[in-house]
């Protein structure tokens, strides 16, 4: 996703993971890739152990990327990492704590890891709820709503839960 140039250094920089457009593409691609892995499992081309390993790799990648540690993306130092971790604890703390179990949530990367572990489990649920096997990924209203909601959450934009 290298697309931009720093005007100060004239060097190529990565797309900013804090922007709506980039986050939406990342989330959409992660869901698409997950669905393709599910199809491989169903076709006998991938084992469930391989699927779980791929899910863990995705969680690690999302943690690094949205934590501002992926060199292929630029990030907002105020938001990515600590700011996002605090926002996620505020909006979905119970799910993160439950997913973490006995693991202490001492730093942003740990919080992000368990938040994204929860997110991956939600992806599987939404793939079923959206009847992706029958309706497909494209123009699927349930899937689009999920992508929109998580894009808002991960960019720090207000979500429907913010208006009480």
Image (cartoon, rainbow, N blue to C red):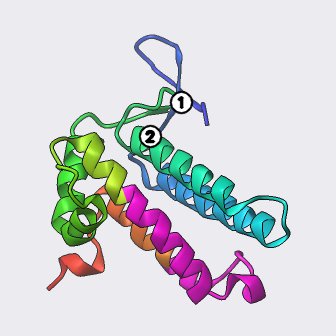
Of labels 1 and 2, earlier in sequence is 2
Relative horizontal placement of residue 113, taking residue 45 as reference (left or right): left
Q: Which disc number belongs to residue 98?
A: none
Q: Answer yes or no: is residue 147 visible.
A: no
Q: Answer yes or no: is residue 125 visible.
A: yes
Q: Nearer the viewer, residue 63 or 110?
A: 110
Q: Secondary structure at mark 2?
A: helix
Tag 1 near tag 2, CB within 8 Å? yes
Residue position marked by numbered label 2 in the rendering: 65
Position in image of residue 114 (x %, y %): 33, 55
Relative horizontal placement of residue 133, taking residue 69 as reference (left or right): right
Q: Secondary structure at mark 1?
A: loop
Tell me which residue sits at (60%, 31%) in the image. 2
Q: Which disc number belongs to residue 72?
A: 1
Position in image of residue 33 (x %, y %): 68, 58
Chief secondary structure of the magenta portion: helix
Specify the segment rendered in magenta: 116-145
């Amino acid at each position: 996703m290298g697309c931009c140039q720093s005007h100060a250094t004239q060097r190529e920089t990565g797309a900013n993971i804090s922007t709506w457009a980039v986050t939406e593409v990342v989330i959409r691609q992660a869901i698409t890739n997950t669905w393709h892995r599910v199809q491989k499992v169903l076709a006998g081309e991938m084992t469930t152990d391989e699927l779980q390993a791929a899910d863990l790799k995705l969680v690690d990648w999302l943690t690094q990327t949205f934590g501002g540690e992926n060199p292929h993306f630029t990030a907002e130092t105020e938001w990515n990492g600590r700011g996002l971790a605090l926002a996620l604890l505020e909006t979905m703390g119970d799910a993160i704590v439950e997913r973490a179990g006995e693991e202490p949530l001492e730093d942003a990367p740990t919080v992000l890891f368990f938040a994204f572990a929860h997110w991956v489990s939600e992806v599987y649920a939404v793939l079923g709820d959206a009847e992706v096997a029958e309706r497909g990924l494209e123009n699927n209203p349930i899937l689009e709503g999920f992508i929109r909601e998580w894009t808002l959450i991960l960019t720090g934009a207000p979500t429907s839960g913010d208006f009480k």
